Image (tube, helix red, strand yellow):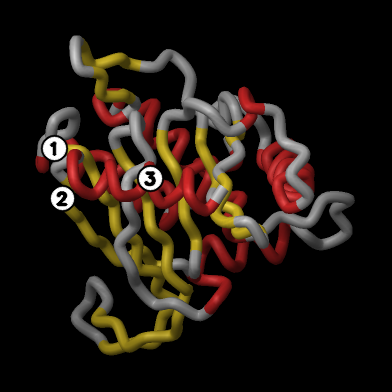
Amino acid sequence: MRRAIARRLTESKQNVPHFYLTVDCRMDALIALRAQANQGGAVKLSVNDFIVRAAALALREVPEVNASWHDDAIEYHAGADISVAVATDGGLVTPIVRDADVKPLSAIAGEIVELAGRAKINRLKPEEFTGGSLTVSNLGMYGIGQFAAIINPPQAAILAVGAAERRPLVDENGALAAASVMTVTLSADHRVVDGAVGARWLAAFRKLIENPVRILL
């Protein structure tokens, strides 16, 4: 597995023209909504569950990012299938949550737990980690504030998610306040995604994260 991962990552970094876009997302509303949703709920939602669905909804808003590069054509996908990076003893595996834009958060949460559990014991079927629209790689749970990830080809983009941290922030009235802020970096394949398109996708993603009720709809 390590050999296969090394080959794919080397090919991606050498052959895919990566570029990187970074934004900060204010997390206070999402954290509060998650706490409220988890009160007495049978399924406990993680911040990552919100991120996965927000990424899928942003693909619906900016479908130009929902694409894969092939030598003879660019393939545009009908469904928003989000690959979720899972660390295992053998290396990084990316099981896919299919049609994450139309599934409720509770279904996404349960599916990620189930897929990650089987990934860690090498019980995934090939179709469960092959393909996908975009990958979410979240190292925030390990305390990483910001990083850039290598694209998982033939996907056109991967979202690197850092930790939500308390930071000083100037609000819309010019006052200094403390806020929970998460930094995310989109690595995009410039053959498929132009800078302005990637910026529109990140803007759509940030708007969803900062107005999380829309993620529940």
Give the percent coordinates (x, y) of residue 67: 31, 24
Q: Which residue does the image show at 50% across and 61% down from the upper left?
A: 138
Residue 169 shown left or right of residue 37 in the figure: left
Q: Which residue does the image show at 82% across and 50% down from the upper left?
A: 43
The image quadrant that residue 17 belongs to is: top left
Q: Secondary structure at mark 1?
A: loop
Q: Is residue 106 at all visible to an observer of this figure?
A: no
The furthest residue to the front: 3
Q: Where is mark 2, residue-wise?
A: 19
Give the percent coordinates (x, y) of residue 185: 29, 59
N-terminal-most mark, 1 or 2: 2
Rounded to the nearest angstrom, the CA distance separating label 3 from label 1 is 21 Å
Crowding around mark 1 (Cα neighbors within 10 Å: few <14, some 14 to 19, many 20+) is some
Residue 109 shown left or right of residue 188 in the figure: right
Crowding around mark 3 (Cα neighbors within 10 Å: few <14, some 14 to 19, many 20+) is few
Q: Secondary structure at mark 2?
A: strand
Q: Is residue 64 at all visible to an observer of this figure?
A: yes
Q: Are marks 1 and 2 in contact (CB under 8 Å)?
A: yes
Q: Are marks 2 and 3 in contact (CB under 8 Å)?
A: no
Q: Where is mark 3, residue-wise?
A: 7
Crowding around mark 2 (Cα neighbors within 10 Å: few <14, some 14 to 19, many 20+) is some
Q: What amino acid is found at the position of numbered circle 3 in the picture? A: Arg
- Choose between 208 and 155: the one closer to the eye: 155
Residue 142 shown left or right of residue 166 in the figure: right
Rounded to the nearest angstrom, the CA distance separating label 1 from label 2 is 7 Å
